[in-house]
Amino acid sequence: MSNNADTASDTDTRAESINNPTYVESTIIMTTVRLVVPFIFTFGLFVMFHGADSAGGGFQGGVIVASTVLLLAFAFGIDATRRWIEGPLIRTAIATGGGLFILIGLGALINGQFLEYAAYDIGTTGIKYGIELVELGIGAIVSGVLIGLFFTLARGDMLTGGDIDQRSPQEQHGSDRS
């Protein structure tokens, strides 16, 4: 049964590659991305959560997590990846990350200063978890924004057909300047 589903998925991907000249199907790239993406995503989460103790943090981890989606888009096509992830999922990641950051920061502000984790009076482990939650929020914001920017830039290229204007700047703006 799953063989028929795989065949239908492969047929859809092949049809998309024929209709979209910017996407070239490669079994090697698709297989490599399928194998590598889970490890890169896990490494991104590791960098995100260990930013308080070692090199890394929310920004760096968010960039690594976003790169996994870009790899998927390059391997399986931008349109297929956009249908899978764009829209509410990206906005939810950005909103959740921002909300988490604000919640942790304002919660501490009520009892002390903005982002002063000692105000939660949970002990040293509370401080560590507070920092990790803030890093998670920052990572969600960064990955959501980068993925959104990627799809926005890709959509712009598709709207113009991807053609590069070979005319000189004077020809593009007209020759009405004398």
Image (cartoon, rainbow, N blue to C red):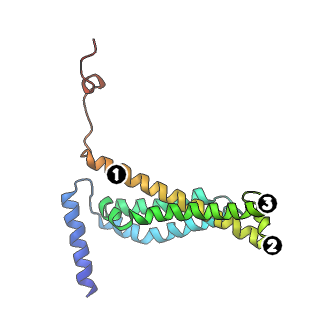
Between 23 and 144, which is closer to the camera in this rendering? 144
Q: Position of residue 144 (x, y in %)?
A: 48, 59
Q: Can you see residue 131?
A: yes
Q: Which residue is mark 1?
A: 154
Gap in angstroms between the C-alphas marked 2 and 1: 47 Å
The secondary element bearing badge 2 is classed as loop
The secondary element bearing badge 1 is classed as helix
What crowding class fits label 1: few (fewer than 14 Cα within 10 Å), some (14-19), or many (20 or more)?
some
Rendered image quadrant of residue 17: bottom left
**Does label 3 or label 1 sit earlier along the sequence?**
3
Name the amino acid type tagged 1. Ala
The secondary element bearing badge 3 is classed as loop
Gap in angstroms between the C-alphas marked 2 and 3: 15 Å
The residue lying at 58 percent from left, 57 percent from top is 60
Q: Is 150 situated left or right of 143 in this image? A: left
Q: Is 112 situated left or right of 135 in this image? A: right
The residue lying at 22 percent from left, 69 percent from top is 12
Q: Which residue is mark 2?
A: 123
Gap in angstroms between the C-alphas marked 3 and 1: 45 Å
Rendered image quadrant of residue 168: top left
Name the amino acid type tagged 3. Gly
Q: Residue furthest front?
A: 110
Q: Residue furthest top?
A: 178
Q: Which residue is mark 3?
A: 112
Name the amino acid type tagged 2. Gly
Q: Can you see residue 63?
A: no
**Does label 2 or label 3 sit earlier along the sequence?**
3
Q: Position of residue 48 (x, y in %)?
A: 61, 63
In the image, which is nearer the foreground, mark 3 or mark 1? 3
Q: Position of residue 160 (x, y in %)?
A: 26, 44
What crowding class fits label 2: few (fewer than 14 Cα within 10 Å), some (14-19), or many (20 or more)?
few
